[in-house]
Image (tube, rainbow, N blue to C red):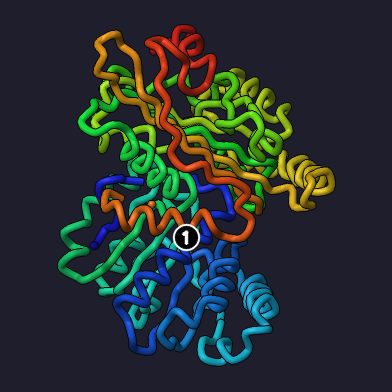
Amino acid sequence: MTIAMKKFRYHCITVLLLLITVGSTVTALSATLSSNKNIVILGGTGRIGTAIATHLIRRSSSLPSYNRIILVGRNAEQGGESVQEVLDATSEFSSDINSFGVEFQSISDVWDAKQLSPLFHDAAAVIHTAGPYHNRCPIPLRTAIESKVPVYVDVSDPLPYLDSSLELNEEAISAGTKALVAAGAFPGMSNLMAMEAAGSLPPGRQIVDSGFNYFTAGLGGSGDVNLYITNLGFGDDMPQYENGKLNYFKALTGKLLGQVDFFTDSESIMAKRVGSQQVFSWPFPEAATVARELQIKGRSHAAMGTAPEVWNFMLGLLVDIVPRAWWRNEQFSQFMADFSQPLVKATDKWLQLSSPDGVGETHAMRIDVTAEDSNGDGDLFVSTIVQGHESFRQDDDARKQMIEKLTSTPGTIDYSGPIVRRKANGATVGPNKMDEVLRSIDL
């Protein structure tokens, strides 16, 4: 397995991604390595980077012995603080800390192969969390392959970046590099859930639609850069399938699509904790990649919402007012992120104080996959999976094992598993105003 999940070319928003990234890395390292080498974390001073380092140390009994975990970033002062943060968070694992060693390495550009090559020379694994990946080429992946790094993991999301990464598959095979791209919550775990939903439908039926809906309460603990990434996405065309063909809708990204039920049972914990939420279209790649893999004949979509609900309407209004080209401008998107950051942090604090668990970082996913019924009247089978959390490939056994591990992590509040229902022709699957919005825009 090289560019892992190759068939499912997978914006990670939640800290759940670190659990997936760590799980994938630990599995690959445990299976293939035994010598003393380094684990290199690009973006190691960010919230995801330090969390990954912490989790790796806490799970070190599953790993071979390593010399160092190297946190890579630009700012030396921040690097020192990040190393201390990891050591403080893992102080109860003192014996494992001695075997690992955590240090900081400063480089000016994580997209410069000349600076990366020396770091990758003795690396057992490279974990790349230094987004955004917007308008970039997969230089860290290529450098890891050229350096014959055994394991590479990233949390990339733009569709062009993923396609460019997958073009390196044969080179990765030759170098012996196992690479997992877009190894986040969404895209990433969401793709596995979609394949699981599809696999639960009656066999031999034509897949019609695939839908991905996500929810995060506030910023969700994923770091300030997420605001910037979200803003950049508002300037992109929305990739999604219509009538079985991939289209790029110029005016769809950021459009409010109506309500989505993040539950399948009105009495469930998800109905109480998340309920129905407004969502807006956002260019997640899985609307294209999973639809392509499933060879759907209908529509795909990907959308997200946040809390409090006023944020969704504010974003929808801004997207309608501000030209798309402005959002694509990195300086403008960064300005908007910096401007909104204090408001978002205040909201996060309010959510923390008002949430029943005192965490305030609830995340949810709803995945729907439909297939034709054989009765000839156009009815559909709909397979739905709902997953919620506080703070996955074609091989059935491997997929189920990964989903079981990921959905049993501390903080998981619900995982419904595939629920298959029959729906009449024309019944709504996904956001309740999707058809209305598509009719209103210039396709």
Relative image position of residue 441 (x, y in whole percent): 46, 11
Task: Give residue 194's position: percent from left, percent from top.
Answer: 38, 39
The number of callouts visible is 1
Residue type at mark 1? Lys
7 up-or-down from 23: above or below: above
Secondary element under disc 1, as helix, strand or loop, is helix
Q: Which residue is mark 1?
A: 405
Front-lying residue, 379 or 98: 379
For residue 208, side relative to residue 440 (left or right): left
Mark 1 is surrounded, within 10 Å at the Cα level, by few (under 14), some (14 to 19) or many (20 or more) other residues, namely few
Residue 387 or residue 130, whichever sits in front: 387
| 232 with respect to 379 (left or right) | right
Q: Is residue 209 above or below residue 130?
A: above
Q: Please say if 15 is above or below 100.
A: above
Position of residue 433 in the picture relative to residue 115 (left or right):
right
Is the N terminus in the top left, top right, bottom left or bottom right quadrant?
Answer: bottom left
- Considering only vertical position in the picture, is 46 above or below 442? below
Q: Quadrant of residue 53?
A: bottom right
Q: Nearer the viewer, residue 121 or 401?
A: 401
Task: Assign the C terminus to one quadrant of the image.
Answer: top left
Residue shown at the point (52%, 76%) measured from the top left:
59
**Residue depicted at 56% across the width and 71% down the height:** 55
Residue 407, can we see it? yes
Residue shown at the point (31%, 62%) measured from the top left: 179
Q: Residue at x 45, y 79 (%)?
A: 62
Q: Nearer the viewer, residue 250 or 74?
A: 250
* Residue 10 horizontal/vertical position (percent): 36, 46
Residue 402 x, y percent position in the rendering: 41, 58
Q: Is residue 134 visible?
A: no
